[in-house]
Amino acid sequence: MNASLFFEILDGMADAVIVVGGDHRVSLFNKGAEKIFGYTSDEMMGQRLEMLLPEGFRSNHHKHVDTFSRQPQQASKFMSDRGEIKGQRKDGEVFHAEASISKVESDGKVVFTAVLRDVTERKKAEEKLKHSYIEGITSLVNAAENHDDETGGHVKRIGHYTKELATAMGMDKEFCNMIFHASSMHDIGKIGIPDRVLLKPGALNQEEWEIMKTHPSIGGNILKDGFSPYLQMGREIAIGHHERWDGSGYPNGIKGEETPISARIMQIADVYDALRSERPYKPAFEHAKALSVICDGDGRTDPSHFDPRVLAAFNACSDKLNEIYENLK
Ligand SMILES: [Fe+2]
Ligand SMILES: [Fe+2]
């Protein structure tokens, strides 16, 4: 292929293609890059790549490139598979981008090529979609709440507890944000429980208790055709939040990791909140008492009910759960 054809191809690309040398100075800036960043190729020649990154990204970028440069070529031809970064246009606007960077060494010289795509529009569409998912969840939860006497405070606190626990367990950011919303649907199945059982002021008899125990399966059915990842996690949580690690829970009596992690996190959050709240059969417990019931057991609740990993996370962040309760009670 001759050089002019090669440059024509390069300039025909919608993505930005930017080449920098070992000195981090730009030596190629295609038409796509001009369009995305607003600088002309002439303006960028010989400039440092950092000019195209927002303030907060610059030092990170330095560290990244340094480590990358020192690795042998065979070990890392690509710095990242299409990582998400932020770029900054000439007019100062910061935008979402996806970039991959590759390294070529020839005659002892190192050349980095960044291929970058502006994903602003896609991000906006994703945000919109996420909002509509959350709107749907809120309506569903509101409908169930009207039927139940459980307070909105409980649902709010549960979102914060589960996110805190998931974070303490080192789950990724997406999971932590997802469980924050998905956990609100845990008792959605109570919408299918008759009022005489759901709203009965005293203790339930055996027959009523059996009816009450169907709420996880009803919840699972309500959410079973859910397409969004929120509804899918919501379904796992709805079905599994009364299961126990030792298999003594309901509705399926499954054990250990057979219950999805989202539901195992939800389970401890729900127990903690129930202990902190007043119930017909018990007063509201202080944090220390709730902590000891969960960690040491009280004859009714036992540590063997909980996933040991979730229990460890609960121990590690219990002060924060207390704060959440106090702020949102
Ligand atoms: Fe429940
Ligand atoms: Fe609950």
Image: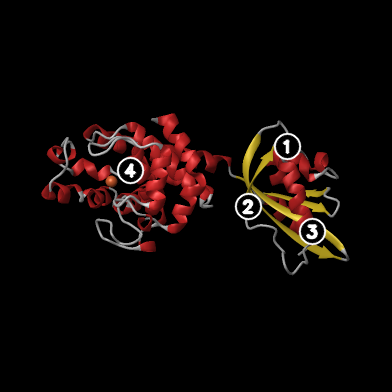
Q: What amino acid is labelled 4 in the image?
A: Met
Camera-near label (2 vs 1) is 1
Q: Is residue 144 left or right of residue 174?
A: left
Q: Position of residue 94 (x, y in %)?
A: 66, 36
**Residue nearest the observer in this picture, 191 or 79:** 191
Q: Which mark is on residue 185? A: 4
- Decide if ligand 2 comes within 8 Å of the CB at mark 1: no
Q: Is residue 10 visible?
A: yes
Measuring from the top left, give residue 113's x and y in whole percent: 75, 55
Residue 129 in view = no
Comparing 265 with 132, the one in front is: 265
Q: Residue 151: x and y, percent?
A: 30, 32
Q: Quick check: marks 3 and 2 in contact, CB under 8 Å?
A: no
Quadrant location of ligand 2? Answer: top left
Check the picture and name the quadrant holding the C terminus. top left
> Badge 1 local density, few (<14 within 10 Å), some, or many (20+)?
some
Q: Which element type, helix, strand or loop, lies under badge 4?
A: helix
Q: Name the residue beneath numbered marker 1.
A: 55
